Amino acid sequence: MSIPAQLGALLEVSDVERPTAAASAVVELQLALGGKVAVDTPVRAARSHDRSHLPSGLPAAVVRPSSTEDVATAVRICAAHGVAVVPIGAGTGLEGGANARAGVVTIDLSGMTGILRLSPADLDVTVQAGVMKSALNAELDPHGLFFPVGPGVDASVGGMCSTRASGTTAVRYGTMRESVLGLTVVLASGDIVRTGGRARKSAAGYDLTHLFVGAEGTLGIITEVTLRVYGQPQAVSAAVCGFPSLEAASLVVQEAIQKGIPLARVELMDDTTIAAVNAYSALEVSGTASLLFEFHGTPRAVEEQTGQIQAIAVRHGGSGFEFATEETDRQRLWQARHDVLPACQALVDGAHTWSTDVCVPISRLAECIAATKQDIVASGLVAPIAGHAGDGNFHLAIVLKPGDKDALVAASALNQRLVARALSMGGTCTGEHGIGAGKMDSLRAEHPAGVGVMAAIKAALDPHSLMNPGKVLAPAGTSRRVSQTLSGRSSHPAPRPEIAALPSYSRASGLGSVTWVASSNESSVPPSSAVQNAMAAATVGLNRYPSLFGDELVAAIARRLGLGDGQVLVGAGSLTLLQQLLTAYSGPGAEVVHAWRSYEAYPILVTVAGAASTRVALDAGLRHRLDAMADAITERTKVVIVCNPNNPTGTVIQHDELLRFLRRVPANVVVVLDEAYREFTQPEEDEVALLATFPNLVVLRTFSKAYGLAGARVGYLAAAPEIVGNLRRSAPPFGLSRVAEAGAVAAWAEDEVLRDTVAGVVAGREFLAEELRNRGFRVPESGGNFVWIPVEQARELEQACVRHGVSVRAFDGEGVRVTIGGREASQAVLAAVDSWLRC
């Protein structure tokens, strides 16, 4: 198994990434998600912005997930590095809500297009966020169903949720707020939360679903959506009618709604829009204003509705009432309405549009539009108006020539006056486009006190402002200040940001439902009776503290290794000792070099110490690239960690390779040789002997593997007296329990038991590795008590193993690690592999 092929382009440039936040995050994303991460400039540029007029920056990378788990992985990695994420779907937004900033990571959801579940009987469907509205309706159509919410362009479901979109059918079927039953959301921490459900009503707790609908990705990333769908009406009819004035057209809509006529759509266009659409779409609509209607229902109901509307229209001066009952004619009519933006752009050569919207009470719609048209004339701009007359929402498509700064200033002033007027009439600064980056000031004007509450929610869910920063609310930092203002102080103690962003170390899934545990690299053989008896005897003195530094165990280890007592330190597991060393020898501003993929605890421990990881990719054979690690050392490097054998790949560094590497490392840089699995390699040389030549070397070992004492937590390190002395000064006293020390001393003396245990593991390792190779897997030679199966669909194989009663450890996109147990456990793994290969 080689390094994922998708890393090639990145590694050609540099396979050693310095710990700048974005660069480190991109490397880890590549390692975790492989080809789902794009770093080439054309892709980053293409997915850096929506259709708004607002500026954007170039993201550091574009992640193209295929599942919620992929999104969660990406968010966790970015959070650990303090790198912001910006979700984007179809990119059809109009307020810069999906625009990137330089250095962020864009999460491109457009590839998440799965229809996860459809229940025609319950009139609901669950889809991934990247599903386009047109694709959804194509899936629903054979079942006699449809999803009615329809923005002016074909948008993704996730984007529609994020902006609380509506469109032409909102007057009858409501907006996305009414259409969403439940969500799957990835939070800023990388945790996954599922809200709502399939029930049509619920009084269970806070309405979390609608907290995220309309949040524009600032509180979490929506990955899956459960939607309400509808049966297709038996009959559909459309009509268009011209009116002498905007007021007349608005009065028709008011009267129709007051009379309870169930209009499916009613759209308003002013004279400028009518002229643009007539020219662009070859329509022949007349009048100063026009209304486009659509009616749904039974044939008789549709006929009744059209008759009622026609009568009302005639009373208000309507003329040229034309019907479209055939589907092709209706589609042509509504396509013309949806083509308003390109039609407006076509009014001026080479132009683009600044599209903005407001919403007012229906009774104020005509007045608001009339005053706005006066403002348009005064500005000298071209700005056609179209809107959803049935709910008081209308749009301006301000036509601008590129580079015309005066026009841009005038457009900004026009937009500000529009918003101020809408708010003065009891309306809102946006009916469906959202706030994005363009209307944050307008939001504060609309909800001066409410913005503080929104900021407090943002601070609670995204304390480091990593989710789509610079959108909806004020810039990063304001939310935390507002939260403290609301409560008088912070609601809870806050850790260092890098600690809060760390992923939690977790064990494999399915542990509660398996017969064999092959996921934790612990021994399947319990300690001998002599060890158990020694530990039991030690419990008699539990009322007393243990020795200060595990003195008896230190003496036993030192004698065996030919060292002085001052060269050995023991503690509660080798990880505790490594953390202690990193705390003493690295710290803020320091770098720690280690391979990757290697032990997943390394970057966590480095971060806890306040340092930064410099990760060096493994070679094509999944082995340490020691020359590259030596090249990665700078004046900031304080510690280098070498894992031998490497966890999780099992590959082994030979003695001569290590010797050459140590000669290249500066004498003031500590080299930690992590030999947790040394006993299973059966080496000829003991690297402890190198301490005499390299006083910067620290050899780290454990009793958790071959000695079978994982539950006792005992580890030791061997190093120069100066290093051990410094670590003892910083170590907590009584760090090793009396019982654990007694068990380790007894196990240390059992050479024959150790030989038998290792022989059994090695035999089982070679059996499983050979069987897997016979099935076509490129299993590397392992020196540990485990085997590495290189497979990108690691989670799928993990679940197959759980179904066969055995837990394994999956590293999604890379491989599966299987700890060697008994022959039955290996047979269960092979059965799971065979079953998975047949699928």
Image (spheres, helix red, strand yellow):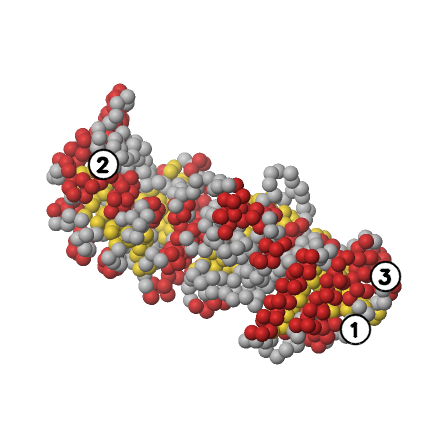
Residue under label 3: 312
Residue under label 2: 570
Q: How many marks?
A: 3
Q: Position of residue 226 (x, y in %)?
A: 61, 49
Horizontal side of residue 487 vs 596, given as left or right: right
Q: Is residue 768 visible?
A: no
Q: Position of residue 706 (x, y in %)?
A: 26, 38
Q: Position of residue 778 (x, y in %)?
A: 34, 54
> Residue at left 75%, top 62%?
367
Residue under label 1: 286
The three-letter amino acid code for the residue at tag 2 is Val
Alpha carbons under labels 2 and 1: distance apart? 89 Å
Mark 2 surroundings within 10 Å by alpha-carbon count, few (fewer than 14), some (14 through 19), many (20 or more)? many
Mark 3, secondary structure of its residue: helix
Alpha carbons under labels 3 and 2: distance apart? 90 Å
Horizontal side of residue 696 vs 195, given as left or right: left
The quarter holding residue 237 reads bottom right
The three-letter amino acid code for the residue at tag 3 is Ile
> Residue at left 65%, top 42%?
199
Q: Tell me whether circle 1 and circle 3 mark residues in contact (CB < 8 Å).
A: no
Alpha carbons under labels 1 and 3: distance apart? 18 Å
> Front-most of 246 and 111?
246
The three-letter amino acid code for the residue at tag 1 is Ser
Q: Earlier in the sequence, mark 1 or mark 3?
A: 1
Q: Nearer the viewer, mark 3 or mark 2?
A: 3
Horizontal side of residue 633 vs 453, given as left or right: left
Mark 3 surroundings within 10 Å by alpha-carbon count, few (fewer than 14), some (14 through 19), many (20 or more)? some
The quarter holding residue 194 reads top right
> Residue at left 78%, top 62%?
250
Q: Tell me whether circle 3 and circle 2 mark residues in contact (CB < 8 Å).
A: no
Q: Earlier in the sequence, mark 2 or mark 1?
A: 1
